[in-house]
């Protein structure tokens, strides 16, 4: 009686690493195609996509960041008041918002909005056969579709992060002034004295990195071959989940390296 061959333990790991390598190569290839067509894309296409990505999400990001700043100030004031250091609320709110919460919060919202939008919109182009028709008409898909969306997502994430920082700082100031009795002028002086260039550099570099991640996953999943609408939905969900997960991992990596660089 023959004995069935046992699977090699490293086989599944090897296949997983190989698949990871293929997907990573595909993501970088998409970004490379967009980068090569940066100066060839039409300005009106970029502005149109930027409006869809950034302007449409501005109210959502601003309101969410406003209340996030208020929540941080509330929690910090309750803890610091017990230690007799309530005046440090402005410092904590400012640094945590600029370096961490505003970039990550904005990126997660953009993963759900821009990432899903890119995957579904480009997915419909692929599924409906429009991509093949554009190639038949000698139209460059990278210039017409890819580059404007990638750069709009990156720029939009950066601009929305800046808006989230200001909205969050205002929310913290409102709560700090109402609960702690601090004057807005004193609160702003504490914020400006606490923030340093490294904090703004950390937050803005993260915003650009997160926008690149969202654009890469959204366009990659959108351009993948699809057989039906079910595959389109699956790829859209995959773009959102993987982009959000990668943003959280990249947040730790970027924080570690950027802080080590500025030390």
Image (cartoon, rainbow, N blue to C red):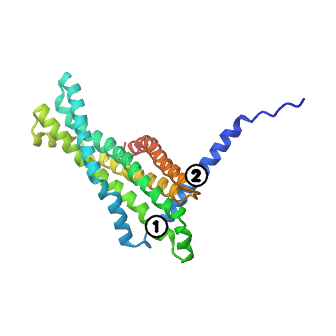
- Quick one: quadrant of the C terminus? top left
Q: Residue 31: horizontal and vertical position, in percent? A: 49, 60
Reading the image, the residue beneath label 1 is: 145
Kindly check if marks 2 and 1 are in contact, taking CB atoms under 8 A apart as contact: no
**Which is more toward the observer, 221 or 102?**
221
What is the crowding at mark 2: few (fewer than 14 residues within 10 Å), some, or many (at least 20)? Answer: some
Q: What secondary structure is marked by label 2?
A: helix
- The image's mark for residue 95 is none
Q: Is residue 93 left or right of residue 31?
A: left
Q: Is residue 146 above or below residue 59?
A: below
**Which is more toward the observer, 42 or 37?**
42
Q: Residue 59: horizontal and vertical position, in percent? A: 26, 52
**Which is more toward the observer, 184 or 200?**
184
Q: Of circles 2 and 1, which is in front?
A: 1
Residue furthest to the front in view is 229
> Is residue 192 in view from this perspective?
no
Residue at (21, 32) in percent of width and height: 74
- The image's mark for residue 23 is 2
Q: Is residue 38 above or below residue 15?
A: below
């Amino acid at each position: 009686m023959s004995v069935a061959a046992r699977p090699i333990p490293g086989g599944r790991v090897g296949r997983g690493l190989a698949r990871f390598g293929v997907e990573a190569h595909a993501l970088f290839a998409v970004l490379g195609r967009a980068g090569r067509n940066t100066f060839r894309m039409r300005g009106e296409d970029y502005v149109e996509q930027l409006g869809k990505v950034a302007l449409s999400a501005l109210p959502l990001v601003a309101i969410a960041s406003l209340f996030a700043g208020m929540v941080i100030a509330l929690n910090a004031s309750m803890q610091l008041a017990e230690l007799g250091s309530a005046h440090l609320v402005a410092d904590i709110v400012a640094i945590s918002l600029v370096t961490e919460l505003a970039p990550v919060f904005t990126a997660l919202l953009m993963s759900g909005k821009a990432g899903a939008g890119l995957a579904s919109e480009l997915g419909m182009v692929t599924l409906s056969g429009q991509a093949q028709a554009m190639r038949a008409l000698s139209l460059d898909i990278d210039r017409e579709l890819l580059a404007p969306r990638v750069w709009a997502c990156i720029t939009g994430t950066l601009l929305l992060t800046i808006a989230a920082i200001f909205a969050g700082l205002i929310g913290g100031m409102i709560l700090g002034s109402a609960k702690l009795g601090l004057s807005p002028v004193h609160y702003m002086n504490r914020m400006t004295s606490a923030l340093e260039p490294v904090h703004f550099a950390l937050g803005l570099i993260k915003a650009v990195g997160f926008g690149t991640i969202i654009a890469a996953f959204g366009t990659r999943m959108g351009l993948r071959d699809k057989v039906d609408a079910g595959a389109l939905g699956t790829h859209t969900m995959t773009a959102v989940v993987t982009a959000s997960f990668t943003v959280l991992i990249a947040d730790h990596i970027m924080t570690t390296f950027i802080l080590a660089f500025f030390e």
